[in-house]
Image: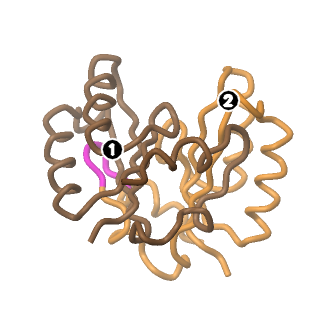
Chain colours: A orange, B brown
Amino acid sequence: MRHWVLAAYDIGNEKRWRKIHTLMHDYGQPVQYSVFVCQLTPTDEVKLLARAREIIHPEEDQLILVRLQPIGRSLNNRIRSVGRPLTSLDIKKLQF
Amino acid sequence: MRHWVLAAYDIGNEKRWRKIHTLMHDYGQPVQYSVFVCQLTPTDEVKLLARAREIIHPEEDQLILVRLQPIGRSLNNRIRSVGRPLTSLDIKKLQF
């Protein structure tokens, strides 16, 4: 089953940051500088984590995947935002 | 009821970033440069969003709060990470 997944990363240097940012575009949409919203199956998650492990420095960097609900249920009641709009601008692009 | 809440923010300038980072320390623990894990009641969320709204630039900045599960249930099966450890290092500090 495909779930909404929030990905957030802290990368210690510019070169690795760009590689992770490029990798993440294969899996979702950026909603912030280092935060993506994705729609992933468990297999997608495993593949993403494996590919990220090849780039990430084990002590300096960190990528977290936060699994939310199945994609059939809207994120609106789960995520609240202040400032730049989130759902109206970014999440919409994720609709397959 | 108190829930685990993930907070992530994108702030367009250093001064406002520092203010939001300081504010967030009233509500949780940093797990990444711009990501905090919090344990919040709905009232805490409302207060946090109101205080953030006074700092945040409506077009340049964004703070998102992602409500996860009640704090009684561990985050371990919800969050997966690569690189720097998350739960063993950071979340533990949140146990009241």
- Residues at marks 1 and 2, CA–CA distance in whole angstroms: 21 Å
Q: Chain of mark 1?
A: B
Q: Residue furthest front?
A: B96
Name the quadrant containing residue A5.
bottom right
Q: Is B69 inside the magenta-drawn segment?
A: no
The residue lying at 41 percent from left, 41 percent from top is B29
Q: Which residues are magenta?
A: A81-86
Q: Is A83 inside the magenta-drawn segment?
A: yes
Quadrant including the C terminus of chain A: bottom right
Q: Amino acid at mark 2?
A: Trp
Q: Amino acid at mark 1?
A: Leu
Q: How far across and down, in percent of the image, does residue A11 sit?
A: 65, 30
The residue lying at 19 percent from left, 31 percent from top is B55
Residue B61 is left or right of residue B69, and the answer is left
Find residue B63 and name its label: 1
Find residue A17 and name its label: 2
The residue lying at 72 percent from left, 52 percent from top is A26
Residue A76 is left or right of residue A49, and the answer is left
Residue in front for this viewpoint, B94 or B12: B94
Disc 1 is placed on an element classified as strand
Q: Is residue A25 positioned above or below A71 on the image? A: above
